[in-house]
Image (cartoon, grey):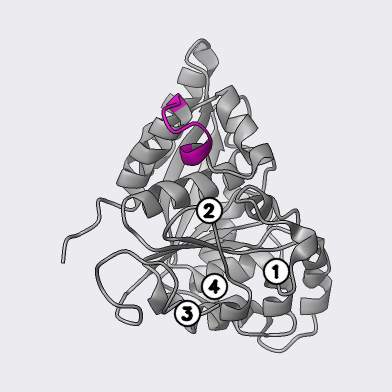
Amino acid sequence: MDLNTATSPSGPAPGTRSPRIIAVANQKGGVGKTTTTVSVGAAAAELGHRVLIIDLDPQGNASTGLGINPRSLTSTMYDVIINQIPLDDAIEASIVKNLFIAPSNLDLAGAEIELVPAMSRESRLKNAIAAVANDFDIVLIDCPPSLGLLTINAFAAASEVMVPIQCEYYALEGLGQLLRNVTLVQRNLNPTLEVSTIVLVMFDARTKLAAQVAKEVRAHFHEKVCRTVIPRTVRLSEAPSFGQPITVYAPTSRGAIAYRDLALEVAGARTPV
C-alpha cells in the first residue's frame, strides 16, 4: 500500500512526523483491550490524526472489528514478523478516513514458537515499524492477552504502554507481572518505554463495586489513570460484529462519546500547522 498517496489529513507531509507508538496491553482476556485500541484509533482519526493500528493478536479481532476479512488477506502481521516482509505491504485502509490497519489472523499463533530460535527476535516489530512510522501520527499496537514474544516485540517497539483495566473484581490481578515485564524491557531492550496510561473500562455506574475498583486503581496509579471512564454498554459489544468501530456504528452512543473523550486525553486535539 502506498501510504504517501493514501487519504491523509492536511498537516505535516508523510515522512516529517514524529509518531507516538503505544502498545495496548493486558495479559487478561476480555478486558476491552481490542475495543479500546480500535475505538481510540477511530476517534483519534476523526480528530485529524493519521493512525495505524497493528493487530498483533492471533485472534485478529482488531482486524475484523474494522471490517477486514481474515480469509482474503495476502499479507498479514505473521508475514511481517516471521518472513520480515515490509510492513507497508500488509497495511490496509479502513472504513474510517485517516485510520489504517495492519491485520492478523490465526497464522500469527505459530509465531511465538517460530520466533524462539530467530535472530533479533525481540526487535522484529520495531524494525518493521521504523520503515513506516513517519507516515503516521499515532501507532497503536493491539497486543495478545499474554506476555510472550509477541508482546515483548510490542514493548520493544513502543514508547508507551496503555493498560485497559476492567471495573470488576480482581481488576488488578496479574497486573504486577505486566509491570515487571515492562521493567525488564526497559532495562534490556527499550529504556524509553513507560506505562503512560491506565484506562478504566466496562464501568457499571449501578454497582458499588465498579466505583470501589475505580477508586482502588486511582489510588495505585494516580495521574496515569485517565479521567474518562468507559461505560459498559450493549452498543460497544455489538459494534465489532458489524465490522465497525463504535464511532461509526453508534456515533451518538455513550460508548462513542466516552471513547472520543478518551482520544482527546490520549492523543490530544490535533495541533494546527
| Cα distance in 3D space between marks 1 and 4 | 10 Å
Query: Magenta span covers which residues?
Result: 247-254
State how far apart marks 2 and 3 are (Cα).
20 Å
Comparing labels 4 and 3, the label whose residue is closer to the camera: 3
Q: Which mark is residue 156?
A: 4
Q: Nearer the viewer, mark 2 or mark 3?
A: 2
Q: Label 4, label 3: how many angstroms apart (C-alpha)?
A: 16 Å
User: In terms of image quadrants, where is residue 32?
Assistant: top right
The image's mark for residue 149 is 1
Circle nearer the N terminus (1, 4): 1
Q: Camera-side residue: 98 or 22?
A: 98
Return the residue nearer the eye: 73 or 177.
73
Task: Check the image and report above or below for 241 versus 196.
Answer: above
Residue 22, horizontal then vertical, whole percent = 46, 61
Disc 4 residue type (three-letter): Ala
The answer to the question of whether label 2 and label 3 lie on touching residues, with beta carbons closer than 8 A, is no
Dot 4 or dot 3, earlier in sequence: 3
Q: Which residue is mark 2?
A: 95
Task: Identify whether 25 is placed above or below 198.
Answer: below
Q: Is residue 50 left or right of residue 57?
A: left
- Name the element at disc 2: loop
**Residue at far bottom of view:** 119
Name the amino acid, label 3. Answer: Val
Q: CA distance from mark 3 to mark 1?
A: 22 Å
- Observer-nearest of 37 and 146: 37
Residue at image location 29% in from the left, 77% down from the top: 13
Q: Which residue is mark 3?
A: 132
Q: Position of residue 108 (x, y in %)?
A: 77, 66
Circle nearer the N terminus (1, 2): 2
Say which label, 2 or 3, has the lower sequence index: 2
Q: Position of residue 109 (x, y in %)?
A: 81, 63
